[in-house]
Image: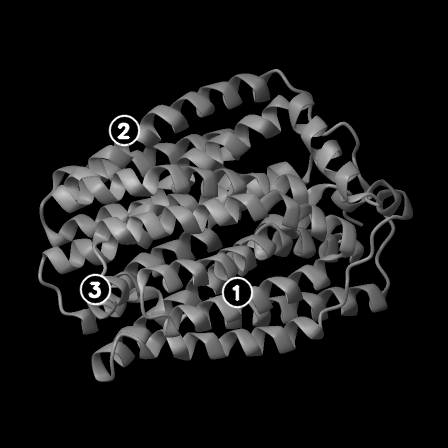
Amino acid sequence: MGVSPSPGQLTAMNRNVRLLRVYVTSLMLTPFLAVWVVYLTDFRELTLTQVAIMEAFFWAVSMLAEIPSGAFADRFGRKSTFLVGVTLEGIGVFSFGLASNFELLTASYVLWASGIAFGSGNAQAFLYETMKAGGRAEGYAKQQGRLQAIMMTSSMVGAASGAFVAAWLDLQAPVLLGAAFYVVAFVVALRLDEPPRDEEQLAAASSYLATLRAAAGFLRSHAPVRFVILFSIATGVASMTEWLLMQPFLASHNVPIGLFGLIAIPVRLSSVLGALGGAQIVEWLGIRRTVVSSFVLTLGGLVTLATVDHVGALFGVMAIAVAGAFRQPAVWAYINDRTSSSMRATVLSVTPFGMSASFALLFPFIGLASDEGIRLGFAVLLGVVTAAAGLSLVLWLKADAGADPPAVLRPEHVTS
């Protein structure tokens, strides 16, 4: 039976969780999210192919920074990583709002993408270690689902307000307004307390290169973790239906820009509901059925988008959003339970690393296909996700069936 946490430990845990929620709310309150593609195509007069090339560059930079930034977090701490990430991202977004040509816009992506890389995986590791220190790690999946729901709600509110600002002023205004929220996030990050880690784990993370080597060795020897990460990457690629293709899709159906944010609300709300219900879905179905269900729902959404030439096909985007929302907390909990703190952020960074690499490779082709017809872009994406996610799912199911449960029942998994 585990030792009950002290009142002081619970107070520290609750404070960190509250501050983390405020931090991600500020970070995700991005007014430009609903209009950034049309900002580039209409305000900056780029073609969709140029936007796709910029996005490929963005994700290539993110890919190169992803795992090193995770190792930075494991070596130098979660709080320092938050501060570096929000600073880079804020400067990048502000530069993005002022850049006047393709070259400067692409240059702003370097800072923006680097900042995102520092943030990815770090919040999940910070939350897990904060709850572990408070003796409540068994509730991580539920708390991660809530955190994800908060992020999506904030993003939804920001997108809706940004579309109105764009219609009222111009397409540049939401971008510059969004940069201000990074200042708020920086101030909140200063107030976070670094969650404690075991001395043995800190010693294991004492070398930056050793952390990278240890994480690589861990993934080579742990097939279930390796394949669930590959599956998460392959299905996560479907999210470009929302981030890249939804705005051109709406424009192709002559939807006014002022309505973009409102139309995005049901998509984000679907994600919120999926994230909030994720822990319950895992409890009902188990991790294996949850993962399989997310795959089926993702394919259903892509088939709808590729075959239905009507604005109502946005239900496909909603299906993909729900699938990702309830899949990710389950996958993160699966990985966290099998990974030590000394390399946790590094291992968690492999998923966004792989997604960045996939986006960098796929965006130019999706952009070219979408310039020919938006449904062709969806169809290409459907083929890629079906093949890659289907194969990785089969490999994960086989590896997980033959694997032992987490070898050590750690104290944080035992409730008092």
- Image quarter in which the N terminus is found: top right
Along the line of sight, the residue nearer the viewer: 321 or 252: 252
Kindly identify the amino acid type of the residue bearing the numbered disc 2: Gly
Dot 1 lies on which element? Answer: helix
Dot 2 lies on which element? Answer: helix
Dot 3 lies on which element? Answer: loop
- Find residue 175 and report its image quarter: bottom left
Kindly identify the amino acid type of the residue bearing the numbered disc 3: Glu
Q: How is the image coloured?
A: one colour
Which disc number belongs to residue 383? Answer: 2
Along the line of sight, the residue nearer the viewer: 79 or 143: 79
- Residue 389, image x, y percentages: 40, 28
Along the line of sight, the residue nearer the viewer: 20 or 53: 53
Q: Which residue is mark 3?
A: 45
Q: Are marks 1 and 2 in contact (CB under 8 Å)?
A: no
Along the line of sight, the residue nearer the viewer: 272 or 371: 371
